[in-house]
Image: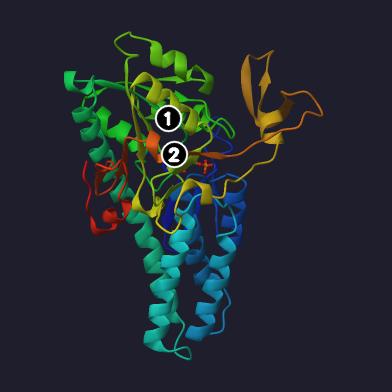
Amino acid sequence: MVLEAIRYDRGNLQILDQLKLPHAEVYDDINTSGDAWEAIKHMRTRGAPAIAIVAALSLAVELLIADIPPTAGDTAAFVYDRLDYLVTSRPTAVNLADAVRKLKAVVDAEVAKVKADGNGDSIREAYIAAAEKMLVDDVRDNEAIGKHGAEWIQKNTEFGQNGQVSVITHCNTGSLATAGYGTALGVIRALHSAGTLKHAFCTETRPYNQGSRLTAFELVHDKIPATLVTDSMAAALLKLKGPSERIAAIVVGADRVAANGDTANKIGTYSLAILAKFHGVKFLVAAPRTTIDLQTKSGADIVIEERPGNEVTLVKGPKWVAVLDEVDLSSSETIKIAASGIDVWNPAFDVTPAELIDGIITEVGVVEKDKNGEFQLQNVFQGLTNG
Ligand code: MRU
C-alpha cells in the first residue's frame, strides 16, 4: 500500500493526521480553508509541498459548498480572501506563498476573460482545476528529483563509483511531506529501486521528532534498509568506516531556497552541512522549483518560524499499559521531559549557507555552483542546470 498524506477527489479532501503517527493512521476531513489553516498550523499536515497542496485543495473543496454571491468578481474576492488567510498559517516554507501567487494569477486571468459581473462558476472551475494540477505535478516533479539525485550521487561520490551508497537524511521529506514519493526521501527511494542504496540513516529531527516518527515510518513502510540515529550522533556516524556506514552523501529537503542558494530547512540541517564539509562528504539539497524563491536574496532575509517551548519540554503519545505490556491507542498521555520553569528556544528551521551545499537537486536536474562558486538558480526556471 502506498503511503498517502493527502487523499483527494473532487469535493473531498482528507489528510493523514501526522501528530498521531506512528501509533495510529487516522485521516481527517478538510472541508474548508479554516480546517486546512488549523491542520497546517498545528502540524497535523506538514512538509513544504504538502502544506501548499493541502491549502490549495481545501479551498477547491470549500468553493463547491460555500455560499458566495454568483458573480465572477465576488467569487474572485472570496478566493483572494481565503488564500490571504491560508498563507498566514506558517511563515518559512515558500511553497504555500508560491501556490497562492499562482492561484491568484489563474483567478485574475479568468476574471479578465468573463469580466467581474460575469458568472462566478468559471472562476470556481479554473481555481479547482489549477489546485488539482498542483497535486499531480508535485508527484511527477518528485519522481524526477529522485532520478536526478540518485544519478548525481552515483556519478559524483567516492563510494557511488563502486556500486552502492549509504546516505544520511534529515527532516521529513517523503510521501508524508509531499503529494507523494518525496524529495530527499525520493532520492533515497530512487537509489533503493535502482539497487544502488546500501543503507539510509535518518535523524530523529525536531519538532515532534519528525525523523523518528515520520521519516522512519516511511522507511520501514517501504522496506528500505535504514537506521535511526539522534541528531547528535551524526558526527560519530560520519567517522565510521564499516561497509554500510561509509556515508557517501547527506541529502536533505528544503523549505525555502534563496536566490543565492542559502537554504532554510529543518532545524539541524546547518549542523549536518558543517559536518559534511569537515568529513569531505557531499551535501545535497533536494527541492522542487516551487521551493526556490528568487525574490529572497539570501538566507538572512528568510523568516524562521519559532514554535512553542512545550514541543521541547513535553512528549505526548498513547499510554503504555505496563501490566499488559502494550500500547493503549485509545488513550494518550503527556509527559514532562524537562525541568519546570526552564526557558526554551525552539526554532523550527535553520539556514544552511550556499557555500556548504554541493548541489541543489530539482525536477529539471542538479544545479552546481559555477566557476565563481555561485549557484545560478534563475536558470532552473528555463529548465537549465549544470550538474
Ligand atoms: O516543519 P515541517 O514538518 O513542515 O517541515 C518539513 C521538513 O522537515 C522540511 O524539511 C520539508 O518541508 C522539506 S520538503 C519535503
In the displayed structure, does residue 335 sit left or right of residue 34? right
Q: Nearer the viewer, residue 245 or 238?
A: 238
Write the residue at 38% across / 45% down: 261
Q: Which residue is mark 2?
A: 353
Residue 57 shows up from this direction: no
Instruction: List the single residue furthest toward the front.
Output: 372
Write the residue at 46% across / 17% down: 235
User: x, y percentage for residue 93?
Assistant: 49, 50
Which quadrant of the figure contains the C terminus?
top left
Using the image, determine if residue 84 lies above or below residue 250.
below
Write the residue at 30% across / 42% down: 361
Q: Nearer the viewer, residue 294 or 251?
A: 294
User: x, y percentage for residue 297?
Assistant: 44, 54
* Disc 1 to disc 2, C-alpha distance: 9 Å
Asked if disc 1 and disc 2 are in contact, CB closer than 8 Å, the reply is: yes
Q: Amino acid at mark 2?
A: Pro
Q: Which residue is mark 1?
A: 273
Q: Nearer the viewer, residue 291 or 175?
A: 291
Label 2: element kind: loop
Q: Amino acid at mark 1?
A: Ala
Q: Residues within 10 Å of mark 1 (few under 14, many from 20)?
A: many
- Of the numbered discs 1 and 2, the one sitting upstream in the chain is 1
Label 1: element kind: helix
Which quadrant of the figure contains the N terminus?
top left
Residue 160 shows up from this direction: yes
